[in-house]
Image: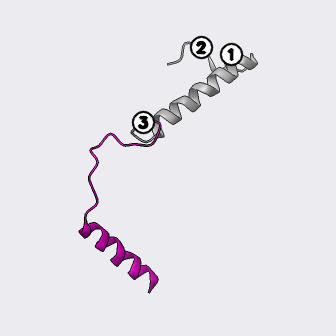
Amino acid sequence: MYPFRYSSIFRSRWMALLWAAGILWTAYDFAAPDGDAAGNNQQEDMPINSADIAAIQANLNQLGN
């Protein structure tokens, strides 16, 4: 699966750091949210209307009780 054996990874400090960086990169690539670096989703933006605001206010009022 890998072009080298696990025992040879940790013989060199630099090889171990590269291996760890690859693991972190893979984890970030798998778990990162979709969108750009600013956190904007690539879905179309929908404006908030008065019905949305009323629903949010109703939910906040329920939390306060």
Q: Are marks 2 and 1 in contact (CB under 8 Å)?
A: yes
Write down the quadrant of residue 13 in the picture.
top right
Task: Relative to 6, say whether 59 is above or below.
Answer: below
Write down the quadrant of residue 21 in the picture.
top right
Task: Relative to 14, say whether 33 is above or below.
Answer: below
Q: Which mark is residue 4?
A: 2
Residues drawn in magenta: 36-65
* Residue at the (68%, 23%) spot, across then down: 17
Measured Cα–Cα span from mark 3 to mark 1:
37 Å
Measured Cα–Cα span from mark 2 to mark 3:
34 Å
Could you tell which of marks 3 and 1 lies nearer the N-terminus?
1
State the residue in front, 60 or 47: 47
* Residue at the (64%, 27%) spot, across then down: 20
Question: Which residue was labeled with disc 1?
Answer: 8
Measured Cα–Cα span from mark 2 to mark 1:
7 Å
State the residue in front, 32 or 42: 42
**Left-right relation of 3 to 13:** left
SS at circle 2: loop
Q: Position of residue 58 (x, y in %)?
A: 33, 78
Could you tell which of marks 2 and 3 lies nearer the N-terminus?
2
Task: Relative to 23, say whether 35 is above or below.
Answer: below
Question: Which residue was labeled with disc 3?
Answer: 36
Magenta segment includes 13: no
* Residue at the (44%, 87%) spot, across then down: 65
Residue type beneath disc 1: Ser
Q: Label 1: how many residues lie within 10 Å, few (<14), some (14-19) or many (20+)?
A: few
